[in-house]
């Protein structure tokens, strides 16, 4: 069953369960939830389709309903946990469906039983949703959730403590509002003591959670100064680095990295880290984690390295640790190829390059973070007067990977990430243009055709917004802005290389005169980011003197962007009065209060002056305040009704917006199809023009043979350079040959094993053939025996007929014997009755016998006691006589 059919069935089962909550509808809903859980739900919510959004909306409503069966709610929570597998889906669940508030409501509803599996499941999903997300304490049920977490963190059960520490660490991290709310609570001091006690826990995960919460709440306070002072901070560094390097799971390593990143934001702790004596060894171990195959772990390691790059004193140390790898590999040219490859794999530089070249559809976050780290480290390495040792070799190894990583993504699903990667790669290449040695290496490997192909791809596939690669809700930049950044960075790179690369200048000027370039250039010039405006101005200075530069189209685009922003600002201002609460309705109570306000003030003045009040005045005050309280209660109920209606209207508007996005995606798909047909026609026209230009070029070449003789020396120089390049390529091919030989040996060994297996199978086949022949012969013998049995059966049928006559005679004799048997049975019954009477008498006599034997036994026991007493008396009397004699 495909995904669409399963989702439709689940949506139908959800509606049936909402209409009638019985056992049958609950069982059907559970079955559909299990069917959807077995599917591959990766990026199902972030695909932008309407059906998954409707299904999740119904499931979330059922989860928040108190009347939903616990088993159904648990199954839905398991499915939602499975859906929240990527960052985009978690943002959609948080922003569009307000799942955090609903989970907090479930936890608050079952706060009396914190060990309930539904509560633990909700806390597990909350930990996923709230990671790296700021949740306001004013959100519904979040204050109750914080109180629940703080109270249960101090409970004796380890399971509930582990479940509560994660969401609490997420809520407190980088959230000033939640931190202020927690600090204002009365039980915050016992909470601090409990967390400090957890620092001695035997679980590293509990220790990391406790440290993270303490760092978020107390880092700039007296408690934090004592916890993270110069005496304790080195132990904290050692603990965190040990957890990062030797952590017991991805979750522990992730929170340990977040903790160290938060600590590095404090200048005092960052200074402590620069003076940490084991920093070099810890940094080498952290860089070694780049060889991990897990994308999540490698992404967190890159995030830590980026945070460490934010400390200026750590950058040279990181450059030295990273750029020494290519240098060491270059010095191993005389060693064996296999040993050199092993040394190369064991160093962090090639591992970082490998993450840069990872597929755009895979660990894209790791690729972008690796590019950001590389940008900062190369800025440090290339910014000085001289480059560190090994930088040039590292750049030589890096350039092919960078250029291969910005090839065409192949489909629109990864277009946004591809554009982001192109922008970051171009930023790194622009940094290399600042050094002559790096610029020389770059100009050898970058061709004008590659840059023009990339520009054409970005113009063709990213011109305008593309719904297939839309940003998740809550993002600020549209796809057109991301594509504009990638396109403008490519043009800036072409501008830097126009003097070093052949035909780059003509291609750049031809691109700048294309009318399609006006749209990304207008977006850059009207952007609110300074770097985009600078890039746009630099390209505008290059393009303005060109004769066919579309300046009019550029001006129209800039005016349209400014008009759109102004209209959005006006609409946002107009929305403000609509969001305000309307004035309260006038009623009789309010009129009474307004009329009697002067009397109230006079009574208050008399009270302040110390005058005595009569009972009537006191009753008037009570009546006035009762009226005020009644008015406030009515206003509160009316505001609650208004809030519920606004929430319903907001959910309805979300559904309408989702439907609108779906229709817009269809319209954009049709527009892209028409645009593709138009581009195909333009491509054919350009091909015909290219053929015509080629024919004209051949006509010119027939008259330019003499000029080619003059350029012979230049061609020889170029051949020399090509020979050098071929020499480098030969070395690369030699490495590939060695690897191919090693693979060939492995394949030969595999072939030998398969040959042995084939011989074994042949022997088994021969044995089975012999067994088959033997079975056929046995089958023939069985058939002959069957014929003999048939003949015997005929004879025996004749014997049966004869026996039937004998049987009739025997039946008559049997009836006579039965009559005689009845008479014998009567006599036997009488005999049996007599036997029972006799057995009853025998049992009574046996009982009397047993009683007599028991009495006889008692008499014997008493006799033995008396005998013993007599013997004892004799012994005592004899003993007394002896004593008298001795005296």
Image: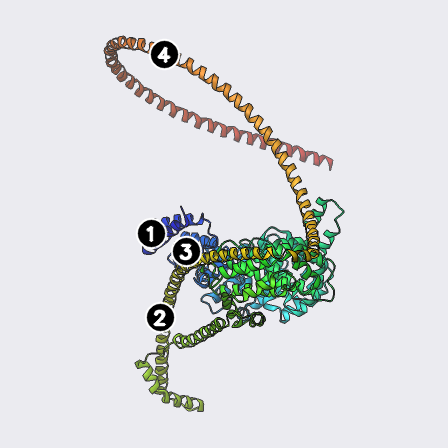
Q: Mark 1 points at which residue?
A: 22
Drawn side of residue 512 relative to residue 47, left or right: right
Tag count in the figure?
A: 4
In percent of width and height, residue 163 lies at 53, 57
- N-terminal of the pair, mark 4 or mark 1, is 1
Circle 4: is it few (<14), some (14-19), or many (20+) Cα within 10 Å?
few
Label 2 secondary element? helix
Q: Can residue 204 be seen in this view?
A: no
In percent of width and height, residue 88 lies at 49, 59
**Image quadrant assignment for residue 169:** bottom right
Residues at circles 4 and 1 in contact by the CB criterion of under 8 Å: no
Drawn side of residue 15 relative to residue 759, left or right: left
Q: Mark 2 points at which residue?
A: 641
**Image quadrant assignment for residue 804:** top left
- N-terminal of the pair, mark 4 or mark 2, is 2
Structural distance between the alpha carbons of marks 1 and 2:
30 Å
Residues at circles 3 and 2 in contact by the CB criterion of under 8 Å: no
Drawn side of residue 481 relative to residue 813, left or right: right
Structural distance between the alpha carbons of marks 4 and 2:
94 Å
Label 1 secondary element? loop
In percent of width and height, residue 207 lies at 61, 58
Q: Mark 3 points at which residue?
A: 52
- N-terminal of the pair, mark 3 or mark 2, is 3
Label 3 secondary element? helix
Structural distance between the alpha carbons of marks 3 and 2:
30 Å
Residues at circles 1 and 2 in contact by the CB criterion of under 8 Å: no
Toward the viewer: 446 or 826?
Answer: 446
Toward the viewer: 806 or 620?
Answer: 806
Is the image coloured rainbow, by chain, by secondary structure, or in one colour?
Answer: rainbow
In percent of width and height, residue 285 lies at 68, 55
Dot in front, 4 or 2: 4
Label 4 secondary element? helix
């Amino acid at each position: 069953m495909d995904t669409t059919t399963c989702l439709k069935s689940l949506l139908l089962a959800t509606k049936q369960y909402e209409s009638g909550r019985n056992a049958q509808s609950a069982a059907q809903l559970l079955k559909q939830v299990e069917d959807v859980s077995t599917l591959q739900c990766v990026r199902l919510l972030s695909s932008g389709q309407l059906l998954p959004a409707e299904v999740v909306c119904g499931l979330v409503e059922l989860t928040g309903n108190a009347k939903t069966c616990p088993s159904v709610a648990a199954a839905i929570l398991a499915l939602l946990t499975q859906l929240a597998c990527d960052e985009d889906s978690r943002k959609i669940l948080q922003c569009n469906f307000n799942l955090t508030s609903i989970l907090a409501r479930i936890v608050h509803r079952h706060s009396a039983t914190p060990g309930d599996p539904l509560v633990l499941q909700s806390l597990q999903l909350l930990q996923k949703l709230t990671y790296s997300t700021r949740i306001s304490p004013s959100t519904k049920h979040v204050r109750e959730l914080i109180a629940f977490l703080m109270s249960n963190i101090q409970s004796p059960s380890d399971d509930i403590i582990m479940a509560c520490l994660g969401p609490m660490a997420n809520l407190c991290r980088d959230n000033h509002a939640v931190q202020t709310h927690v600090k204002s609570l009365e039980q915050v001091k016992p909470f601090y003591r409990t967390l400090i006690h957890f620092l001695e826990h035997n679980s590293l995960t509990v220790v990391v959670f406790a440290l993270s919460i303490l760092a978020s709440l107390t880092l700039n306070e007296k408690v934090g100064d004592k916890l993270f002072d110069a005496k304790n901070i080195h132990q904290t560094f050692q603990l965190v680095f040990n957890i990062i390097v030797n952590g017991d799971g991805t979750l522990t390593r992730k929170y340990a990295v977040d903790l160290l990143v938060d600590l590095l934001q404090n200048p005092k702790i960052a200074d402590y880290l620069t003076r940490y004596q084991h920093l070099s060894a810890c940094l080498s171990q952290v860089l070694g984690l780049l060889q991990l195959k897990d994308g999540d772990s490698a992404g967190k390691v890159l995030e830590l390295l980026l945070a460490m790059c934010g400390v200026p004193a750590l950058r040279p140390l990181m450059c030295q640790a990273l750029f020494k790898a290519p240098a060491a590999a270059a010095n191993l040219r005389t060693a064996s190829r296999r040993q050199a490859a092993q040394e190369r794999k064991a160093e962090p530089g090639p591992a970082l390059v490998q993450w840069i070249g990872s597929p755009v559809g895979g660990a894209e976050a790791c690729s972008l973070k690796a590019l950001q780290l590389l940008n900062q480290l190369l800025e440090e390495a290339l910014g000085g007067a001289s480059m560190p040792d090994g930088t040039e070799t590292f750049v030589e190894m890096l350039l092919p990977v960078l250029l291969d990583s910005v090839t065409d993504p192949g489909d629109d699903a990864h277009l946004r990430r591809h554009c982001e990667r192109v922008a970051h790669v171009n930023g790194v290449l622009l940094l290399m243009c600042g050094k002559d040695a790096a610029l020389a290496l770059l100009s050898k490997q970058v061709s004008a055709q590659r840059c023009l192909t990339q520009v054409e791809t970005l113009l063709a596939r990213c011109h305008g917004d593309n719904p297939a690669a839309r940003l998740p809700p809550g993002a600020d930049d549209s796809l057109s802005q991301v594509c504009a950044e990638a396109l403008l960075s490519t043009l800036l790179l072409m501008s830097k290389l126009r003097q070093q690369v052949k035909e780059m200048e003509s291609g750049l000027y031809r691109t700048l005169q294309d009318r399609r370039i006006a749209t990304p250039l207008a977006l850059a010039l009207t952007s609110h980011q300074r770097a985009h405006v600078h890039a746009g101005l630099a390209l505008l200075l290059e393009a303005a003197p060109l004769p066919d530069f579309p300046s009019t189209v550029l001006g129209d685009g800039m005016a349209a962007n400014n008009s759109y922003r102004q209209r959005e600002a006006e609409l946002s201002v107009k929305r403000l009065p609509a969001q305000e609460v309307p004035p309260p309705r006038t009623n009789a109570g309010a009129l009474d209060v307004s009329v009697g306000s002067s009397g109230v003030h006079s009574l208050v003045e008399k009270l302040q002056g110390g005058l005595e009040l009569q009972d009537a005045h006191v009753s008037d005050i009570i009546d006035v305040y009762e009226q005020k309280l009644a008015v406030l209660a009515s206003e509160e109920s009316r505001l609650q009704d208004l809030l519920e209606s606004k929430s319903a209207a907001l959910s309805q508007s979300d559904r309408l917006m989702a439907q609108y996005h779906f229709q817009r995606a269809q319209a954009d798909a049709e527009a892209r199809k028409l645009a593709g047909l138009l581009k195909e026609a333009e491509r054919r026209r350009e091909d015909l023009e290219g053929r015509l230009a080629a024919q004209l070029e051949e006509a010119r070449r027939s008259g330019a043979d003499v000029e080619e003789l003059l350029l012979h020396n230049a061609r020889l120089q170029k051949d020399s350079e090509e020979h050098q390049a071929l020499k480098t390529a030969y070395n690369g091919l030699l490495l590939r040959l060695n690897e191919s030989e090693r693979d060939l040996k492995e394949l030969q060994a595999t072939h030998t094993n398969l040959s042995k297996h084939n011989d074994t199978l042949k022997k088994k086949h021969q044995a089975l053939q012999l067994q088959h022949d033997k079975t056929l012969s046995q089958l023939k013998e069985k058939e002959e025996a069957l014929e003999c049995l048939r003949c015997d059966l005929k004879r025996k049928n004749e014997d049966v007929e004869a026996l039937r006559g004998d049987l009739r005679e025997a039946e008559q004799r049997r009836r006579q014997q039965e009559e005689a048997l009845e008479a014998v049975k009567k006599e036997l019954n009488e005999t049996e009755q007599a036997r029972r009477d006799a057995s009853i008498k025998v049992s009574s006599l046996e009982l009397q016998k047993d009683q007599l034997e028991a009495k006889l036994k008692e008499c014997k026991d008493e006799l033995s006691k008396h005998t013993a007493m007599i013997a004892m008396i004799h012994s005592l009397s004899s003993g007394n006589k002896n004593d008298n004699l001795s005296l």
